[in-house]
Amino acid sequence: MDSSLYAARRRRNVIAAIASYGATFVGLTWLALILGVLFWQGLGGLSLRVFTEMTPPPGAMGGLLNAIVGSLIMTTLALLIGAPIGILAGTYMAEYGRHSYLTSVVRFINDILLSAPSIVVGLFIYYVMVRPMGHFSGVAGAVVLAVLVIPVMVRTTEDMLTLVPDTLREAAASIGLPRSLMIRQVAYRAARAGIITGLLLAVARISGETAPLLFTALNNQFYSINLNAPMASLPSVIFQFALSPYKDWQDLAWTGALIITLAVLAMSIIARSLTRTRKSS
Amino acid sequence: MVDVAWQETDVSAQDVAERAKVLNRLRIGDIVFHHITRSSALFVLVVLGGVIVSLFLGALPALGEFGFGFLTAQSWNPVTEKFGALAPIYGTIVTSLIAMLIAVPFGLMIAMFLTELCPMWLRRPIGIAIELLAGIPSIIYGIWGLFVFAPFIQQYIQPPVIAAFENVPGLSILFAGPPFGIGVLTAGLILAIMVLPFITSISRDVFDAVPPVLKEAAYGLGWTQWEVWRYVVLPFTRIGVIGGVMLGLGRALGETMAVTFVIGNAHRISPSLFAPGTTISATIANEFTEAVGDLYTSSLIALGLILFVITFIVLAIARYLLLRIERRVG
């Protein structure tokens, strides 16, 4: 009588194992499918032309130069604005106020901002920048992205500085180094790989952002590096071209999607390998 | 013989003054740096406050015009300037529910595989692969969903399902045709793929934090792997898993581009899951730049405010639960 009960338990176990293997298989297949289709559709259009020519009118040949340049400009600017603020805020949380009330509040709010819908941040910047200025602009796009960079940088900086052993800090303090110098000369150096990882993750996060750019930087058919005017970006061009009825625009959208994905994947893999070597050393 | 050099020279007054100047500079630098970092930390709070205040101010005209009726009205008519948020709210909740119904069991099973069944050497690569899914920008899911997934659903999934449930009461309404491909169900499925990695990686982390003694004790009693996972690991990590699920839900509610591509942007509440619909974020993304008139724009900002309030609550609960489990483990 017991053996049947045992068999039932064994059977349940096997079913669970199969479900578990199956779920993992499906998850990995999905990743392969997405990447596979992306390469299949995007690789054909990938040529030098993509990087050297403007976005074309429908029916003509062209590339994605203005979009790529726009994305690069806005991403760089966003990093220049957002990264210092994020790093400094993380520094306060890990070095000055590690156990303070302010730190726990900021950490809680920061974690929420980290996963808050980016489109809402877009509306915020629209309200405080685009509306008063009266027109869409590249600066507004960069500021939106900067607001998205901040939480990533705060999180990684705090985590990485917390990992720096206190003995290093004590050694620095014992030779009379003032606290701010200790942080900049000792703690930052010890946490450098981690902070760079955070930068890469931040870039990976913002380089695919589309929604908040739609109503801050808008888009631009033409080559423009004027920050005070609407600016093209790779994601918004993909959005516009993919939803268009023209085959050649759709093909360019696929190529753009492939470029973004490759860049993002490369950055996350580099970021991962950076933290890995740090851990093993 | 130990030579000890002893400086007998007097320290001149000038040296003292010099040293005081250097020390003073360092002291000021210290204070300045402290305040800069502190203001940066406060800036994070300012950003949150700015988001809330600006959304509220922007939404004020619409909220003043429609009042609480904005939440319950279904009409969305830019011509007559009658706006109601019910259809986008409904779409947001339904697509997120579909996503969670699929992603939660899948995510938990994958996490179970990664922590219990998978051979050690495979754990890291598979874990990374799943996390890479999380890193792919949402617009990629959108373009993939529009050109690959939606046609597939339209051709191979919807016709048989519509035919199969045609005469079943209840389900025939849920799966009523015609097969568009794009629609509420497709958007939910894409969302499921997008939140799967979040749920998986958090569940894996909390499963890993279960003390091995607990599992070993259960194995010692002769429990099977499934029983150990179901009756030891899962109850022990319940709070953390719920936190991870809420985090995924927060993502699903606010996800924009992937949904915008495949939901069809139709402002109506249809009982059929195959029908086109809209979500809050898709509505904003689609219509904001084309919105004419202050009331239209303000209504869209009001939608954003509703979305932010919903996701804020969900994410706050998620963080609170995850914080609790972090404290228990740490």
Image (cartoon, coloured by chain):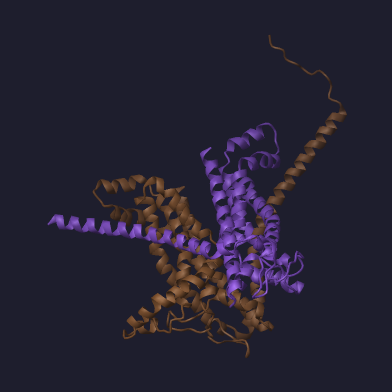
Chain colours: A purple, B brown
Residue A244 in which image quadrant: bottom right
Point out residue B195 in the picture as x, y percentages from the top left corner. 47, 64
Residue A13 x, y percent position in the rendering: 27, 56
**Front in this rendered view, residue B232 or B226:** B226
The residue lying toward the viewer, choosing from B205 and A255, is A255
Q: Is residue B260 visible?
A: yes
Task: Please identify the residue farthest to the left as the structure is shown.
Answer: A1
The answer to whether residue A143 is seen in the rendering is: no
x, y percent for residue A10: 23, 55
Looking at the image, which residue sits at the far bottom? B80
| Residue at position x 67%, y 54% in the image | A83
Extreme residue in the top direction: B1
Return the residue nearer the eye: B197 or A234.
Answer: A234
**For this rendering, which residue is in front, B287 or A117?**
B287
Quarter of the image with the N terminus of chain B is: top right
Q: As displayed, is residue B329 above or below residue A35?
A: above
**In the displayed structure image, the side of residue A89 where residue A34 appears, left or right:** left
Write the residue at 74% across / 47% down. Answer: B32
Rendering quarter of residue B41: bottom right
Q: Position of residue B278 (x, y in %)?
A: 52, 78
Q: How many marks?
A: 0
- Residue depicted at x 79% and y 19%: B7
